Image (spheres, grey):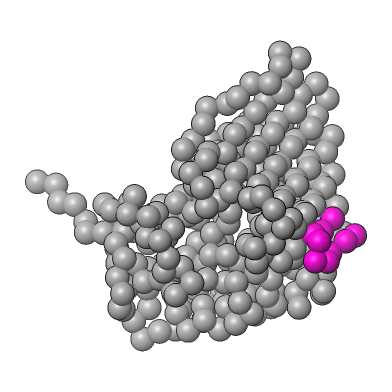
Amino acid sequence: MTTTAPPLAVLLDPALDVPFTHGTLAGLPQWLRRTETGPADVVAVTADTPDWPDRLRAVLTDDAPPRAVLLSRVTPADPATVSELAALADELGIPVVVDSPWALDPTVTEHAERLRAAAAGAVVVDTVVVVPTAAGRAPAAVLLDQLALVRLVVGPVSGLRVTGLDGRGHTAGAHAGGVPVQLSSVLSPLGSAQARLSIRSRGEQWQLRFADPNTARPTAALLIDDAGEQLQPTRYETAHRAAWRQLHGAATASTQPSYTLPDLVADLRLLPPEALR
């Protein structure tokens, strides 16, 4: 007789205890259920305030620590401190899934092999993000999100050079696997969040077009060549929902998350000092 394991109890910090998260969890009832009090099997921590490393440390060292942690809306922090937290989490055997608005998108996973192959022969990789001012996402945090996306699609970034970083957005250049990478963002008082990643090579171009992470609109993957623009198979799942699935897998089956604390540390170390303040 086969028995089904009960769903994991999820404790949300206040910033994530909102209808959007509730709806995401409601779509995974066989795996996860929200609880209002601890102890919990998994804990979600919002990382959009400067004290997030202290709050993550408190969760990891709690008398009744969780089996896994979701770290969401990450903003820049001291790489040395986050590295210590990564070592602590590893020592305690608590996996930490770093949520990202684009990097964990299932469309990225679906086409990962073809995208990596295209990137190997690319002339340039370009990623542009438009962020509404009302979202409260600083350009440095957006740049960190872009680095996560490039890491998962192309590979780790090296030699990051930030040529502009202010209240209007950012511009930066780098390399990934020897391929030039351009990263930019624009803060806009109008519209919704959107992002695009293009892999341009001789004879073809791949484009990933990401809609606002808070909507149900799927990411579009397009191959553009001499045959025209070809829409690839679509995955109707947000990156945030995929992060929760990865969290469940890490907690119950020891599966490796796509984007981890050590990955985050490596990307934080690329940022200039002004982005860490």
Give the farthest residue toward the top.
Answer: 227
Percent x, y of residue 249: 39, 54
**Which quarter of the figure is the C terminus placed in?**
bottom right
Query: Does the magenta segment cover residue 249?
Result: no
Residue 107, how many percent across, how many down? 55, 38
Stretch in magenta: 163-172
The image position of residue 97, as x and y in percent, is 50, 61
User: Residue, x 84% and y 64% (percent of image)?
Assistant: 165
Which residue is farthest left?
A: 1
Asked if the magenta segment contains residue 167, the reply would be yes
User: Magenta stretch: dominant SS?
Assistant: strand
Above or below, comparing residue 215 to residue 10 in the picture: above
Question: Residue 1 in the image: x percent, y percent?
Answer: 9, 46
- For the point 85% across and 52% down, the residue is 173
With 69 as the anchor, is 39 left or right in this view? left
**Residue at screen point 70% across, 77% down:** 78
Residue 48 left/right relative to 156:
left
Q: How many marks?
A: 0
Q: Which residue in the rendered view is the most extreme toward the front?
A: 190
In the orientation shown, which residue stands out farthest toward the right?
163
User: In screen coordinates, is 245 left or right of 88?
Assistant: left
Judging depth in this view, the residue of 269 and 20 nearest the camera is: 20
- Residue 159 appears in the rendering: no
Which residue is located at x 79 percent, y 51 percent? 183
Q: Is residue 7 visible?
A: yes
